Image (spheres, rainbow, N blue to C red):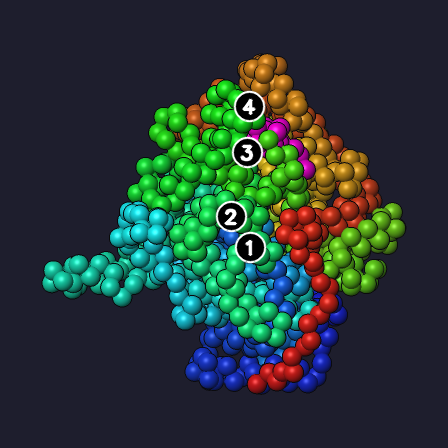
Amino acid sequence: MAGVQSDHDKRKQISVRGIVAVESVVEVKKSFNRHVHYTLVKDRNVATPRDYYFALAHTVKDHLVSRWIRTQQYYYEKDPKRVYYLSLEYYMGRSLQNTMVNLGIQGSCDEALYQLGLDIEELESLEEDAGLGNGGLGRLAACFLDSMATLGLAAYGYGIRYEYGIFAQKIKNGEQIEEPDDWLRYGNPWEKARPEFMLPVNFYGRVEDTPEGRRKWVDTQVVFAMPYDNPIPGFRNNVVNTLRLWSAKSPVDFNLKFFNDGDYIQAVLDRNQAENISRVLYPNDNFFEGKELRLKQEYFMVAATLQDIIRRFKSAKFGSREAVRTSFKSFPDKVAIQLNDTHPSLAVPELMRVLLDVEGLPWDEAWDVTVRTCAYTNHTVLPEALERWPVSMLESILPRHMEIIYRINHTHLEQVAKRWPDDMDRMRRMSLIEEDGEKRVNMAHLSVVGSHAVNGVARIHSEIIKSDLFHDFYVMNPEKFQNKTNGITPRRWLLLCNPGLSDLICEKIGEEWAVHLDQLAKLKTWAKDPNFQRSVMKVKQENKLRLAEMLESEYGVRVNPASMFDIQVKRIHEYKRQLLNCLHIITLYNRIKKDPSAPFTPRTIMIGGKAAPGYHTAKQIIRLICYVGRIINSDPVVGDRLKVIYLENYRVTLAEKIMPAADLSEQISTAGTEASGTGNMKFMLNGALTIGTLDGANVEMAEEMGNENMFIFGMTVEEVEALKKKGYNAYDYYNNNAEIRQCLDQISSGYFSPGNPDQFKDLTDILLKYDRFFSLADFDAYIKMQDHVSEIYQNSSKWAEMCIYNIASSGKFSSDRTICDYAHDIWDVKPSWEKLPAPHETVS
Ligand SMILES: *Cc1c(COP(=O)(O)O)cnc(C)c1O
């Protein structure tokens, strides 16, 4: 393509991606050929591109091994306080390029594969995404692992090795089709199974008293947890941490009853039942489904992880002497457990159970240890997302935990009663057990009570949990409540995904920004420099061309690369208001139709994201966007001024292609609903401008860059609250705004669904009668701000200046900063920028 350097040349010249040394190129080639031969058992006549991917992955993994072993040895020798991040989701994406980038061997590998006549980008594209997450929460865990390793923390991620990750999304005639994500089909070259550390996890059974006066959980069904270790390399510091993912394994004697009854075949077949625990990721984002299998997943992960943590704590080395720790007094000084939302909150009663029933600690001591060890991160205030497990389900699956939860609640409510005597309503509000309707355990309340620190994920969200969701708890223990604004790793979300921009930034300010993202602020000097503006916009244009090529080759859609790329990618949810975006699209279309010769800023509007399979409204939203696109894209009057594209199967790998090519980022949730957002940060770091509400981290983004560099519109949290009080009537807006009226009348008359006018009745009913997220109340402000966006886009110098300001102001949103804050304020551990010594390694 004219004007775009070949990918090989482009990647080669970026020194921050690793110096190309002749010897290391030779070593990589040798190692690669050895793996083709010995690991893949192929010669170059029969090897497939996938074989070559695996040979390269193994070559790169070899570079990790000594560093990984040495890092773990080093932790054993020094015995620092360990940080344990517990999460039901890790949305890792691909590992190959990230590993090469962090090890600084990308240049050598590029050159070696080039010399071997292979296209490294084609091989990279054969890696399956590790899609063990739904969206922001799972991706946050992945960014945190990268930052914890880069900051030299003795940190471990713990989670589940789902056999099926987030489903692959196909769109057929506007309908979402889910396909199972069989990501392990060809094997996973990064993981190492550790059968020697397999651990039992118990379910069901009953509780009895022991002669020593303790409680004992007996007659349980056992499932084994098999650990798979995944390397987490830090950025150029020779640190390799571990993400340990548990897989369910039947015990040898599982369902032996059948065997004794003579049904051997049935006994073997039933082994699958136990192994279903780690079969599949629940595809809900911000929604609690309450399924028994999900509860088992949560406990399975927590129970296996805590056994591992306690084993490591006990077998520590004190100075030069190996010993077994017998006292748990020092446990909180050696162990920090961070709960990623309430999903792993059974860690609180499980740690209590082990300390009480196994280790024999008295209640008060066990409770003190538990609270000082655990910390809880809240990720949402949406009521439908909060986990509330039925007491009946907990009593059956985890009877001892239910006893412990009752006693925690009893002690907790005694404290409440001491401070607020006879305040029955407060007791009811603060109870861990909800008594209205089916009895349930409020897992957020359990997490708050069981933790010494509770944090929200952006300043505005942390304020809302203090004033609203956890207000009573805040009044009782204000010192517990903190904010930790989310961040993203600049390695994956700039260095790896946007080599053109990375290179340009390095030319101006050097290479330190990759680990000290604050340094991007130096770019402000050149915000008004026409040469720098031109360079930044040239990179953006190249990235847009690359995305356009991909859209054409993979989906057969042609887009105008001179148009504004206006993008909203995130899970489909009513609170994120993809419908509001859709109303803007229809409004633009109606304006073109009304006056085809009026000036118009061309836009390619792209929307992408998965809907939870059981979320009917979200699936309808996808259908509406696709149907609107079909009408607009085929209307000759519109031409290439307006195109609407549904980006199928949004996932980490697609995000890496989209962020660098975006002009405009849509962050338009109702104020007070999006806890933080991290997609917003990825766009900002890659030089897209944001149109957004004062919600989540958007507030802090605006503060960092100045309101004049962001397109802020719509109600504030206070205005939303006032509207709720007054009563929201969507018809007020419908009756007073002709453009709203036209949009809604078209949708409900079948304009976009010819022959089926009722197709979107549910959506128009929501917008006009039951909209919990007040879309129409923000419509006017949104459209006016979009008009302003179009106007500014025409002024390319002004637009470029704003882009540079965005990039230069994104330093705060590095997950390195977030992790430093957790380390200092919650975990009491110290980051280290020191490198570990490099291993003397030979590649082959
Ligand atoms: C970053 C990311 C998200 C989170 O996006 P939000 O806009 O913050 O909801 C979701 N999915 C993927 C694949 C991501 O990379």
Tell me what residue is drawn at x 24 percent, y 64 percent. 253
Q: Start and end of the magenta stretch? A: 458-475
Q: Which residue is mark 1?
A: 329
* Amino acid carrying mark 1 in the image: Lys
Q: Quadrant of residue 115?
A: bottom right
Mark 2 secondary-structure assignment: helix
Pointer 3 residue: 381
Disc 3: CA contacts within 10 A as few (<14), some (14-19) or many (>=20): many
Q: Position of residue 527 (x, y in %)?
A: 85, 48
Residue with the mark numbered 2:
365
- Can residue 759 be seen in the rendering of this structure? yes
Is residue 552 one of those drawn in magenta? no
What kind of secondary structure does the magenta stretch mostly adopt? helix
Alpha-carbon distance for marks 1 and 2? 8 Å
The N terminus lies in quadrant: bottom right
Mark sitting earlier along the chain (1/3)? 1
Disc 4 or 2, which lies upstream in sequence? 2
* x, y percent for residue 543: 68, 55
Could you say which disc has been placed on residue 136 in the image?
none
Q: Please state which amino acid type lies under the numbered disc 2.
A: Glu
Specify whether residue 610 is in view: no
Amino acid type at mark 4: Trp
Rounded to the nearest angstrom, the CA distance separating label 1 from label 3 is 35 Å
Answer above or below: position of 31 versus 827.
below
In 3D space, how far apart are the residues under numbered discs 4 and 3 (Cα atoms)?
26 Å
Give the residue at the far front of this rendering. Answer: 212
